Image (cartoon, helix red, strand yellow):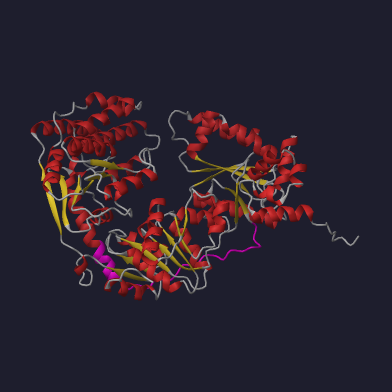
Amino acid sequence: MLKIKPRLYQEKILSTAIKGNTLVVLPTGLGKTLIAIMLGMVRQKKGKILIMSPTKPLVEQHAKTIEDISGIGPQVLHGTIGFEKRKKLWDADWIVATPQTVQRDILRGIDISRFSLLVFDEAHRATGEYAYTHIAKYYIEKTRDPLILALTASPGGKTEKIDEVMRNLSIQQVEVRTEDDPDVRPYVKEKFLNWTPVNLKSNYQITVSKVKDVLRKYVRELKSMGYLKSADLSTLRKRDLLKIQSQLTGEYDAMSIMAAVLKTLHALEMVETQGPGAYLRYIEKLKDDKTRAAKELVPMLPEPPKGEHPKLEKLVKILKKEPLPAIVFANFRDQVNRVVEELNEQGLNATKFVGQRKGMTQKQQKQIVEDFRDGKYEVLVSTSVGEEGIDMPSVGTLVFYEPVPSGIRHIQRRGRLRKGGKVFVLVTKGTKEEAFYYVAKAREKKMVRLLKGMSPKKITQAKLIAYDEDAPHIVVDDREISIAKYLKNVKIQRIEIGDFILSDRVAVERKTAADFVSSIVDGRLFSQAAKMKEAYEKPLIIIEGFDLFSHRGVHPNAIRGALASITLDWGIPIIVTKNQEETAKILEIISKREHDKGHKPAIHRPKATTTEEYQELLVSSLPGINLVLSRRLLEMFGSPAKLFGASLYDLMNVEGIGDKKANQIKKVLESIYESNNGS
């Protein structure tokens, strides 16, 4: 029984979603989760319900929302829960999980064909190699009566991006609503959007002009070398420069100049839109950069301008005038810290909200949001981590410290203003920020137009090649999950030597080009080669990527020498592939050849030379026991003899050994051997 009454547009969307795989595009705060709950309650008679969201905080948030609204207490699954424990938790009727966890567990043998509904939250992520793509393909192939519900505030403003999301999730129909639609409009209070221009002071303009002079010098050099058609700074696009940079392999002078251009562009952005503090911090970072480009650039850059950026002054005025609480979005973490510092100095009780990478833990993030909701802080200053999914409390004022050129992010940020109020976008006049503002608005309008033109649009469901239990399988090290998703028949376990075991005689060590070079420098390469040669009859090395000789600091002859030594001295063949997908294809072809030639299916049994290694291999031959668990069991019991005499209870007390594995071990050790040879 639902504890809240669905709105008319939610019921309309539900009636569509019941009929087939549906992409629901609905602004943040208008009840996408309720639609998922209602559809789940309809489908639960046919099977289990799986709801996925990108992060652990979002997963826990959705689980709480489901329980609050419906009384259903779903099981939460994420990577901090060990796999042995998760296996049992998969029996729950309702599960909320991170997609990375779901993908890993599928590769370890979890069957999701029992689920009658899969919900993909923040569905715009279903592109490229993101876990959503592979989960959806597997689910559609394996399930007799599959149903997918994809939820997002914005799937993107380009036809190709929207098509990719729909194709990857096998979407058959689209339901899109905006705040201006008649059935949504009654539930949306007015949000006044204010484009707030900020004029640079004369001393800032002088510094900006000097930085542009430096940039112009480098751009002219690139033009004279034939890499740019124009030296006009207004035509520079970072995306174009990065594309050119990727094609400069071996052109060291051009590479250095291009690096200087990109660094100068960033310095220009800092002084134009962020202020002297951000600009000075960036220069200090450049001083620690030992590259030729940085050493040449630092003396040429001017001193930072005096005084704060006028944006900061404008922000304080807005927040002192407009209703609180407020959220301020800023692109750069350093700037978040400076904004929080200034707001507190001006008597506004502010705190920061940043991501986990060198920032906050998930626990800290959760506490900050709760404190903000409880009124402990008046202003929350957030990086992009606050845009997507996290259930922020309602605010009366929202400020973009700088506009963003992304239609998705523009929509997500505005969605944080729940109860009406005003949105302020601070735009530094005469800079690229003016273009960003109009680009974001144009992309947002284009997205809505494209989506409404697609609805309803039938898309044929993609089918995978069925999993063949009798086909040769490949043992994949559990640290190589990124490759495993391209393979059909795999067994995931920890491998001590090599990354992939293709048969009883073939093992493969996979290295990216960068990792291969670094393994030469630190000496890992030849020790790994020695171990593989000792353990397997036919070891093989795969190098992924064609940029092997473009790494600075290592002479190409050293790399050529290592390749020659591995091939001739160690007798280990080397294959170079373009990317992960091509690596997977090579692995499957070799595995099939080994199978066709009569070699046994892939098993991980490296040769033993010491008593300890023989003990480890002996124990690892027990059902469900890999080398990691083998060592854990030996450390617990001291010897194989004591292990073999252990009780069921003692076995189950070892981490990673549940009741199923313990019973299998006891059955193997205690069952009477019955010969099948007739003697």
Q: Nearer the viewer, residue 449 or 424?
A: 424
User: Where does the image place residue 252, in percent across and percent down from the top left?
Assistant: 36, 31
Residue positioned 37% across, 60% down in the render: 65
Question: In which image quadrant can residue 595 be found?
Answer: bottom right
Question: In which image quadrant can residue 452 be found?
Answer: bottom left
Q: Is residue 393 left or right of residue 660?
A: left
- Count of numbered circles in the view: 0
Residue positioned 25% across, 39% down in the render: 336
For the C terminus, give its image quadrant.
bottom right
User: Where does the image place residue 37, in percent across and percent down from the top left?
Assistant: 38, 67
For the N terminus, give its image quadrant.
bottom left
Main SS of the magenta segment? loop
Task: Give the residues in magenta.
Answer: 447-472
* Farthest right residue in view: 679
| Above or below, 655 relative to 420 | above
Residue 470 located within the stretch drawn in magenta = yes
Q: Nearer the viewer, residue 324 or 357?
A: 324
* Farthest top residue in view: 299
Q: Nearer the viewer, residue 300 or 433?
A: 433
Residue 321 located within the stretch drawn in magenta = no
User: Where does the image place residue 658, in percent across and percent down from the top left?
Assistant: 63, 53
User: Where does the image place residue 283, in percent across and percent down from the top left?
Assistant: 26, 28
Q: Is residue 455 visible?
A: no
